[in-house]
Amino acid sequence: MEQQETAVRELLDEWVGRVGKRDPQRVAALYHPTAQFWGTLASHVRDEPVEVLDYFERFLDREEISASIGNLRLRHHGDLVLAAGHYIFKWRDKPEDDEIKARTRFTFVFGQPDGEWTILQHHSSAWVLSGF
């Protein structure tokens, strides 16, 4: 289990790093070809590699984007690892604009159907603080 957690944490760190480099192809490459992905700003679930790439091409078309992960919780289910937590995205739409900060929550499902850890499922949504 410890090896699984280490591998998943490294994969999440890689995801954050690739987002920060604004490299949509390398971010999309972390998703398994059969992955399902519902991005924070998406209007629909994407379940084709070309759709995942399209999302990240649009999402990463910002200035100085970065992501940081907080409150990460991992759970093991057989050969799968589920991750839940939040991330904070920061960016500028234009260099002269004020920084925008968005706090979002996520769930990932990680597995290794082809022998290497990959993202099988990912859902992210805006975190509106209210209620309970």
Image (cartoon, grey):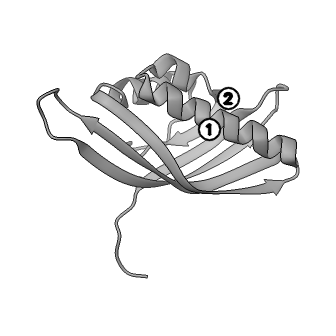
What residue is shown at x 62% (from left), y 38% (from top)? 12
Label 1 sits on a secondary structure element that is: helix
Residue tagged by mark 1? 12
What residue is shown at x 42% (from left), y 54% (from top)? 104
What residue is shown at x 48% (from left), y 50% (from top)? 124
Q: Position of residue 72 (x, y in %)?
A: 61, 55
In the rendered structure, the answer to whether residue 116 lies left or right of residue 14 reads right
Instruction: Tell me the quarter of the image containing the C terminus.
Output: bottom left
Front-lying residue, 101 or 46: 101
Q: Position of residue 53 (x, y in %)?
A: 47, 23
State the residue lying farthest toward the left.
96
Front-lying residue, 127 or 96: 96
Label 2 sits on a secondary structure element that is: strand
- Tag count: 2
Front-lying residue, 31 or 1: 1
Q: Earlier in the sequence, mark 2 or mark 1?
A: 1
Callout in the foreground (2, 1):
1
The crowding category of the residue bearing disc 2, from other C-alpha atoms within 10 Å (few below 14, some 14 to 19, many at least 20), is many
User: Mark 2 belongs to which amino acid?
Assistant: His
What residue is shown at x 58% (from left), y 44% (from top)? 122
Q: CA distance from mark 2 to mark 1?
A: 14 Å
User: Mark 1 belongs to which amino acid?
Assistant: Leu
Residue tagged by mark 2? 32
**Observer able to see residue 41:** no
Q: Position of residue 56 (x, y in %)?
A: 42, 28
In the rendered structure, the answer to whether residue 129 lies left or right of residue 36 reads left
Q: Quadrant of residue 61?
A: top left
Residue 80 numbered tag? none
Q: Position of residue 77 (x, y in %)?
A: 83, 55
**Observer able to see residue 66:** yes
In the rendered structure, the answer to whether residue 9 lies left or right of residue 49 reads right
Rendered position, 61 above or below 88: above
